[in-house]
Image: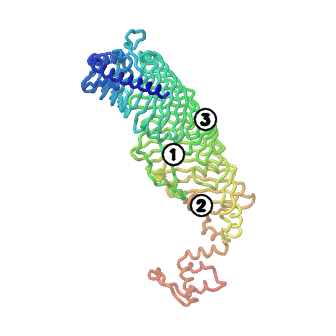
Amino acid sequence: MAQGIKRLGISVAALIVLAVIGALALSLLIDRGAMRQAVEAQLRAATGLELAIDGDIEIAIFPRSYVTFSAVRLKGDGDADSALVVETLTANLRLLPLLLRRFEIADIVLIKPSIRVVRDADGGSNWTPFIKSLTRTMKPGLDDQVSFSEIRLQDGVLSYHDDAGKISETLADIDLSLAWPSISRTFAAAGQFDWRGERLDGSISVNDFIAALAGERSGLKLRLAGAPMKIAFDGAIGNKSSLVLEGTLSADSVSLRNALRWAGQEPPGAGGFGRFAMKARANLVGPAIALTNVNIELDKNVAEGVMTYTIAGNHRGLQATLAAGSIDVTPYLSTIRLLTSGARDWNRQLFDLGSANPVDLDVRLSAAKVTLGSSTLGRTALSANLRGGALALSVGEAQIYGGIVRGTLGVTRRDNVANIKTQFQFNDVDLEACAADLLGVRNLSGRGNLSIALEASGSSPFGLAQSLDGQALLTGHDGAITGFNVEQLLKRLERRPLSGGGNFRSGKTPFNTLNVAVRFSDGVATADDIRIEGPTARISLTGTASVPSRDYDLKGVASLANVPGAPGFNLPFIVEGPWDDPLIFPDPESLIRRSPASAPLLDAVKDRKTRDAVRSVLERITGGRKADPDAAAEPPAAPAAAAPAAAPKAAPPAAPTQQ
């Protein structure tokens, strides 16, 4: 056994030695010039491309057979702006045919290739003549077709420039493997490359590569995967008069905001645009792609419909018609804070209007339910149009606060100043919820209608409040104003005007009708006509309210409903203080006048001589005298005039005025 193994080992070693000697002899006998010409001819036959070799040529036969060309470029494309320039092109040869002195390429490696694609306004490119030559070369049925397994690109760069679409893109550090369709019709490529600072994995497969080169319809599969987004397409491609794609398109991203920024589109605001997924039937013709049977998910919001995306020069446009069951738009508005955290003052932080979004939007959306912060809208139909940085929002109909709202909102900008115009009509809404959300007023209930037409401009919410102009009209019915009970107060003050207002800020005042008309000018709201009529009391108000400082300065009159045979009781009152917690108190002078004991005293103290006489008596009682700023201007009254005022049963204090 040992002797047999030894003889076998010697035989194998001898064969290896003979093979090495034969390979060395073969390397000496092979004509390197013929080998180079054969490789060049096969490259030309396989690709249809005429290559110019400007550098050195290296030929090796043992231990590895290859031919390496340096500084290779396509012929006929100019030396400065060549469509293809390769630093090193290596053609590896098959070993067995080489032993028979036949030169057959096994695979090709392109080291640091630079591919330049320029598309002109007519739709042609600098690669058009080469593609035509490649199509003729790869036509099936030719006798001299050459086959090799693959072409590998290492550390390559591809630059694309479209004059018509104003598009310029660069793919760098390309590491790609191409299955060259020399025999079969299928073309496939897979690898990695850098695009806009991200490393992407990509693959492409064309069922009939020759038909695709000729512009005929062919099956296409495309995959791109990276940190920003994953995209997949499965369908068909054609390019007769213009590029046509038909098939199923799917995309998903963990952050649409980051994906849009990577794609060169700055998303609006700073909230939302997180988890994203979409699947649709795509039809691309030229610069427009139409998506049907769209199923889209964004931030857990799911919608269905159709979309169209167009590219024309620097213009980008997106049109969409979508329907959804439930949508939460709170994340997109979470960064828009009108009030500060204390809800006592307007937010003074400047708007971020620096970023320009070149994409024009035209979106129509219908939803069964829309959540907006603490508010919930029922059936909603709205449209949004964004063009040139100007937003136009139209609410066709939305169920909110138990009623219906319709209206428009327009937002434009000039430098860092936002200009806003809005018109809305709220019909038969719950006034408690409506007033709390829109005005910050939380002491009103009932149902009614609200009509507003406002406009403002500013660089912050506080600036908008300072410049607010327009008008508002509120009508309500069958409600109440909480915080005070006008009926109880009036009845008590009617009996005892100076009894105080201990319970004035408690209870509620019901009303049958409510009418409020307000004009806005430079942030000041002027109440022209506020009327509240209830079953037992009536209230009328006039005055102003400051929108920037969010406080009231109102005066009104409250009266008991007239009882047949009895005179009415009118009480002037004042409303002052912040919107969310105003001070409401009766006019003190009116209460004093209504008191039988205090009214004469009020008249008396208004007379100067009587006031001086009262002061003189008080000084005699206290034994002191305080400085009077008016003493120098007028001598003190005679002591005799003060005596009647000091007597308990004397004539009324007004008697001294009858001199």
Q: Name the residue under label 3.
A: 324
User: Between residues 581 and 166, which one lies in front from this camera angle?
Assistant: 166
Quarter of the image for residue 287 reads top left
- What kind of element bears circle 3? strand
Q: How far apart are marks 3 and 2 (CA)?
A: 40 Å
**Please, what is the three-letter code of the amino acid marked with disc 3?**
Ala
Q: In this view, does 428 lie to the left or right of 523?
A: right
Which of the labelled discs sits on residue 155, or is there none?
A: none
In front of the other: 284 or 65: 65
Task: Give residue 468's position: percent from left, percent from top.
Answer: 48, 50
Q: Which residue is drawn at 30% across and 28% down?
A: 88
Kind of residue indicated by mark 1: Gly
Q: Mark 2 points at which residue?
A: 581
Q: What element carries label 2?
A: loop
In terms of sequence position, does the residue under pointer 3 or pointer 2 come before the other?
Answer: 3
Q: How far apart are marks 2 and 1 (CA)?
A: 32 Å
Q: Dot 1 corresponds to which residue?
A: 271
